[in-house]
Image: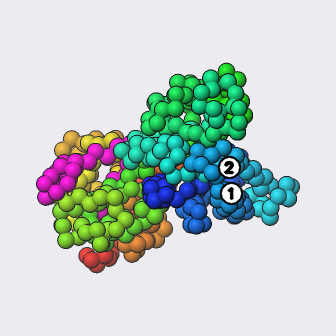
Amino acid sequence: MNQLRDWVAVRLARGSPVALAAVTWASGSTARGTDALMAMDESGAMTGTVGGGFAEGQTITAMRELFSAQPATTDAPSGAHTRDLKFDLSPEASQSQMTCGGALSIHLERIEPGSKVAWALLACFARVGEGQRAGIAFFDIPNDADSTWTAARDAPTRAAEAFAEDYTVIGADLGLSSTLRGLLRASEPGFCGAAMLPLPQSLNPALSVSSSHAFWLGFSPDPTVFIFGAGHVGFATCEAASLAGFSVIVTDDRPELLTVERFPRAKSLRHIESFASPLAAGPHCRAIAPGPLDCTLILTRKPDIDQEMLASLLTTRAGYIGLIGSKTKRQGIFASLKKQGFSDAELSRVHAPIGLAIGARTPEEIAISIIAEIIAVRAGILPAEMPRSRNAADGIAGRVSESAPPAEKH
């Protein structure tokens, strides 16, 4: 999602309008849920997806139509900026040749550069860029600026306000923050997707009689994958994690490996002096503190470094801790850490050998197995904590590290 936000921000900054398409409701079998978001600029360039297939094809056509009618002002009437699409994808509906059986609604919103809506969206993006959740509510207000908010004399104007995760207003305050905050606190929309929020009768006069819903779009910072080890597997895993939508921070004590040319997809590169204090700030890097939504991967080049790394990570609240290596290596490291006072419960947080059992051998295949396991854990398909004992057959990356030549290990 970071990539989509940056894509939109760049175009608004250079004066190009942008259209957003978001799934606001989904039922049954659909390709994506309400976390799906797609953006298009006036040239037809796109990023993101609302699920592909028939529904996305129709959405793309509708987004292009939003650009065909040029509004006269940056804060034009809402009809020039919005559209709602509904899809019944069941075979009985004969709406398409899709047979998945689901249904969904998609909302389209055109955003003009320099408008109040654009400023609110950019304020939302800035808050998310600081590592906090934020959302934006789009709504209609009367065209008459001196109105007492009881009725629109002409077509309503499209407006928006951005909110922090406690639903307090950020960015431009249009004087409706308390009204909208009440709606948001009553509805409690999430910060990981879109929704259409019905406006209660008591709130309608404060907005516009023509508006019965507010469109909500919530954003959360992308989850972070912390990679410790910039070797072959670390490089491949950075590539795979970035493509899967994670922000990636790579840490190593070898500056010759930590280059932007080698890791173009990494959010940041941390050159540490040694792995004795891998999380602390140093002359060349800032401190890090992995949290419950973050994933940490120990992909270093030597078992003693791995042990130091694991001891450090077990003191954090990281949601996923993965250790590359064989079952024998894991047993040795665990035995040493138990002597240092770590309990079985603490060690059960460690996914070792790391990765799903897909028969991976090359660094690229191992990277795919690692990211697949992370996705499964985050989705609740696999447990966050591992059983006290794990079969050797579970350890793809472990078997590779025992059999592959040194250059292929890490």
Q: Are marks 1 and 2 in contact (CB under 8 Å)?
A: yes
The verdict on residue 11 being magenta is: no
User: Residue at the location (40% across, 67% down)?
Assistant: 239
The residue pinned by badge 2 equals: 80
Snapshot colouring? rainbow
The C terminus: image quadrant = bottom left
The answer to whether residue 12 of the structure is visible from this angle is yes
The residue pinned by badge 1 equals: 69
Amino acid type at image mark 1:
Ala
What predominant SS class does the magenta segment belong to? loop
The verdict on residue 277 being magenta is: yes
User: Residue at the location (80% across, 64% down)?
Assistant: 97
Amino acid type at image mark 2:
Ala
User: Residue at the location (18% across, 44% down)?
Assistant: 340
Vertical relation: 246 (above or below) 76:
below
| Circle count | 2
* Residue at the top extreme of this rendering: 202
In the rendered structure, which segment of residues is drawn in magenta? 273-299
